Image (cartoon, rainbow, N blue to C red):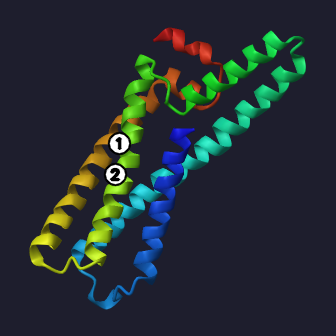
Amino acid sequence: MNFLLRVKRAKFVLDKSSKMGVEGGVDRGTTTVNRKYMWLVEQKLLHFVDAFYQYVMDRVYHSAWSQLCEGMAAAGSLDEVIQVHEAYLLSIQRRCFVVPDKPWAFIASRTHNVLGLDLDLYSVQQTLSSGGTVAAIKARCHKEVGRIDKQFDDCMAFLLRVSIHPCIRLLLLGTDDSILSVF
């Protein structure tokens, strides 16, 4: 539950900050290269969070819910219902990368890093919009945006390398969780 709230919070913060940039009185004629760079980083993060949110809601929860309903219909005793429910929760946790199993810990840490970067960028945007007109503050904020961009690129490179692995791809596409025995 905590994981889904983190994803929703990151999505909310990025949506709010992108609306703030559009409505927030930024004069498009005088936008600087740094402001455009920040918008680019914001859009990269927003794309990742939106895609990941859709993955969790559509692929993970929808398919797991269907499996849960089928399992509940086939269950003949309370013990079987409990077993089906535990399998449902474990399937969701694995496919959302929140299980502390060794192969998932690396993926989970990078995913959590990206969600944290969203909040970092929002903090930078708040600093700039609430009186960050001093040159030193602006320079520090733009340096922070560069750090966020670099960390995001590093996380994405790792996640892309991992997603190419056939076993991980099968899990992401919603197949049986027994494939974890390969690890």
Image point 36% across, 48% down: which residue? 116
Residue 115, image x and y in percent? 41, 48
Q: Are marks 2 and 1 in contact (CB under 8 Å)?
A: yes
Image point 28% across, 65% down: which residue? 124
Specify the label residue 113 is tagged with. Answer: 1
Where disc 1 sits, the SS reads helix
Q: How crowded is mark 1: few (under 14 residues within 10 Å), some or many (20 or more)?
A: some
Q: Quadrant of residue 75?
A: top right
Residue 15 at least partly seen: yes
Residue 164, image x and y in percent? 45, 30
Residue 90, image x and y in percent? 61, 22
Image point 79% across, 32% down: which residue? 66
Q: Mark 2 points at which residue?
A: 117
Image-based side of 132 in relation to 84, left or right: left
As drawn, 4 above or below 30: above
Where disc 2 sits, the SS reads helix
